[in-house]
Image: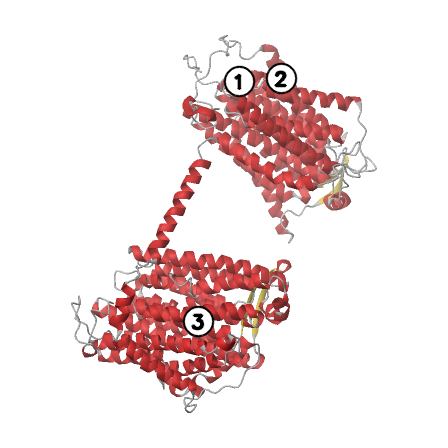
Amino acid sequence: MEALYAFCVGLLTACGIFLTLRGRTFPVVVGLTLLSYAVNLFLFASGRLTEDGAAVLGTSEHYADPLPQALVLTAIVIGFAMTAFVVILAMRARGDLGNDHVDGRLPVNTMGGDRT
Amino acid sequence: MTLMWIPLLPLLGAVIAALTAHWGRTRCAWATAALPALALALILSLIPQLSETGSIKSTISWIPALGLNLSFRFDGLALLFSVLILGIGLLVILYARYYLSEKDSMGRFYAYLMLFMTAMLGIVLSGNLLQLWLFWELTSISSYLLISFWWHKPEARRGARLALTVTGAGGLALLAGILLLGRIAASFDLDVILQSGDLIREHRWYPAALLLILAGVFTKSAQFPFHSWLPHAMAAPTPVSAYLHSATMVKAGIFLLARLYPALAGTELWFIVVSSTGLITLLVGAYFANLKHDLKGLLAYSTISHLGLITLLFGLGTKLAAVAAVFHIINHATFKASLFMAAGIIDHECGSRDMRRINGLWKYMPYTAALAMIAASAMAGVPLLNGFLSKEMFFAETLEQEFLGSLSWMIPVLATLAGVFSVAYSVRFIHDVFFNGEPINLPKTPHEPPRYMKVPVEILVGLCLLVGILPNIVVGPLLNIASSAVLGGELPDYSLAIWHGFNLPLLMSLVAMAGGLFVYFHRAHLFRFQKQFPEWNASESFEMAMRRVQDAAGKLLDWLENGSLQRYLLLMLMLLILMLWPALTELTHLTGKRAHLPVDIPSLVAGGLLVVAGLGTVIYNRQRLIALLMLSVVGLVVSLAFARFSAPDLALTQLAVEVVTIILLMLALFFLPQKTPKESSPRRILRDICIAGLIGGIIGTICYALMTRELHSISDFFLANSKTGGGGTNVVNVILVDFRGFDTLGEITVLGIAALGIYNLLAGLRLFMPSGDSEGRQWALDRHPMILAVISQSLLPLALLVSVFIFLRGHNLPGGGFIAGLVTAVALILQYMAHGVDWMKTRLDIAYHRMIACGVLISALTGVASWLFQRPFLTSWFDHFHWPLVGEFELASAMVFDLGVYITVVGATLLILANLGQMTTSERPVTKEQD
């Protein structure tokens, strides 16, 4: 199970990073969201995987580590706020600059290899 | 505690100087001088206690585990230096009052001077080496401000920059040396370090630590080859030169040499490095002092030479040499300060410092001339003056040396040679300036300065004479107590008599006198000889070097920062790989010893779904709507994973957030292009896949390695105390609202700030709205379908009831403010979607930004309330009550806190989404968007 979990975390990270490397704002936002899933899962896993052990006292014999859970809970909410901020920033950038490229200007095609 | 006041008082003086500047110059000077005078009185009052105990200490613990304490230590050496710093400082305050013109800002000058004084006192009084270093750096900075006081002059700016760079670089070396020393002695406490001299000297890091510390000392004390900053610092106002280059700044290096003498001195390395540097500096300084036509230039090189002399004495390593060094510190401070002041008077009254033009001043200012001549004679080492005594001791010490074996005779010879040069430039200061014909082409007709401008010079020259004639009475006790502090208690036998009979040192003095007169009167040959060498200006070379560094830095910056975000990200990610790679290759066992969970079919299916959806998001990333749908599947699987692995709170939160995120992104997508153009070259895509894959692999590996190892967590504490201390059985919620309540308070504040930022970004947004989708189909006209409207409306009370239920049970079962807030927000957003903003506005007219403020305020006030019961911030309270009908019911202050969280989450989420949704309702422009 641990291997499957770790594989999923790694895959989400890779997908997120690939998308954040794109040149337009929307895929970057989607990439950041994927990356934040990966980060939350990773942090959660630092408390190790536990089955049937919700950290509610009196419900089980052994409990999952509640501390990473508390941290991840706030991270999820803040992550939403950040995603919202970035996506609205992207909208504003498009409104003010007239394009949705991350650099605020469309790449010049004559620049050769460093095109987006 | 008295000790702490000594550096604090001048710091207060800096403030007072700045505040009283508009009172007029004399009053400002008096007000400023009052504080160092008080500090001096404090120092003197400590002397009786000092002679009883040897040293006084006062410490305030700051981070004891790291050895970081605010610690002050007062002993004989600190006494000597504090008296010099404060005494000469007071004279400089008086002198500067008359030296600075009305155009100069008196308050600013005194404020800098006081700041510098604080820094110097901090150095000499520090009982902790790191603290000493901090004050050491403060002297560099405040001396920079003082040297560049006349910042309109380019040479002042350059001189200040050069001084700051050289002494600042030395300061960094010193810090490295101190850190090594602290590691060797296992403490930064001065007492400990001074007592572990043997341990330090035998340690294998000793050479490195010594050389680094000496680099700091030599740069500060202008030792060869770091001396070039000092002559350029002469661009400062003369009171600054008189202060910095006689008793303070340059003596800070000498002080450190003396301070660490018991810990570092006594080895071959110390001997060779310190004495040879001192000897070379002594000779180089004395030689170049003869070549300067600028009065202050002469004094600057003479200062370098005398600092070399003191360094050489410390380097010689005998006890008597150390006593002589301490003695010369006192003598040099007095005669050099008075000479600088005299030079300042001459500059002030003649309008020039060029000795080729200033001649025959005896006729114009006989009184000043007499004072300056006595001070210059002391510098030359004429009998009956203080310079003579320490110079005799120095000559006597050089005769005792045997470290060069059969070549040891060279040391006294070289010392005598330096003496010859020293007499020559002193004679020049006397003869060339006050006699030797008439002034040539001076801008002003010289005359005596104002009465009080001479007072500081009179006092210092008086001291030169008193020490020279009655050394035992005037300076004997101070010298004894300071020297014994340097030597760690044992004092050698020495005598301060003026007359030791006819002996070799006296002969050396006589040779120096005669040779000096000879060199002076044949100085034209010397100038002609020196003319054959190309002139080298340290300041210009420094500026050139700096410009080159700046150009190189600019080029590097242009290359790194080309404005492409993708490139920055790529560089950072590659750095990440570079840093993680070696750490992971060192990890030999990937799998830890922890037992694995078995894989079951549902997990496998969910995992597969996640892989497909994740990859799908990437593959279809150019068709944005499809990518978004795929993303929502990923989010769903993530919340299932949380549910599967015993985190019901997380699963609920993730689910609710998932809903709002997707609504948000859908809304945003409405305003953004529906498709991403195909831009990336195949090469770039391949490169990005490689980078992303590599990092994904690394993160997955770390995650796996982490999960398969045993957990050592602090969570047992939370599990054990959740019920008894926090009054709740849902530990996650109790952590959020109680144990780590302060974190949560911070987090909801961040949430609120983000929402307000978004509100602000939306306020001025001008975007064209597309009238149809990317394929040109018009949007449906029926914006609020009937069925959705009816169902959502009837669901609302139910949804709100659920959220209240989730909120109330949160303390004991999965739920709580965050989740309840999100559920409420989702329910309300559904109404917005089903009915439109206008419909909602008439029914629910709440300013969401006020709601956020209320939420944060409620949570914060809950924390503050515990102060009323004399408890720390955010201490929680709970109790059980028996209510009729309801039965046993628990009330806790954490619930009020959680209510704040709930209100903030609802407010923030709705502020973001309702405002974004509102964008779609303004009059729809007809222009079809071009893309």
The residue drawn where x is 64% and y is 49% is: B866
Q: Could you tell me which chain the residue with mark 1 belongs to?
A: B
Q: Is residue B645 left or right of residue B685?
A: right
Residue B70 in the image: above or below residue B639 = below
Location of residue A21 in the rendering, given as x and y in whole percent from the top left corner: 54, 27
Image quarter in which the C terminus of chain B is found: top left
Q: Is residue B345 left or right of residue B580?
A: left
SS state under label 2: helix
First in sequence: mark 2 or mark 3? 3
Q: Residue furthest top?
A: B777
Q: To which residue does mark 3 refer?
A: B279
Residue B888 in the image: above or below residue A114 = below
Q: To which residue does mark 2 refer?
A: B792
SS state under label 1: loop
Q: Could you tell me which chain the residue with mark 2 belongs to?
A: B
Location of residue B777 in the rendering, given as x and y in whole percent from the top left corner: 50, 7
The disc label shown at residue B836, or none: 1
Location of residue A33 in the rendering, given as x and y in whole percent from the top left corner: 59, 28
Q: Could you tell me which chain the residue with mark 3 belongs to?
A: B
Q: Is residue B275 left or right of residue B92?
A: right
How crowded is the residue under tag 2: few (<14 C-alpha within 10 Å), some, or many (20+)?
many
The residue drawn where x is 29% and y is 65% is: B530
Task: Tell me the distance, in whole angstroms, between the alpha carbons under discs 2 and 1.
Answer: 12 Å
Residue B142 in the image: above or below residue B565 = below
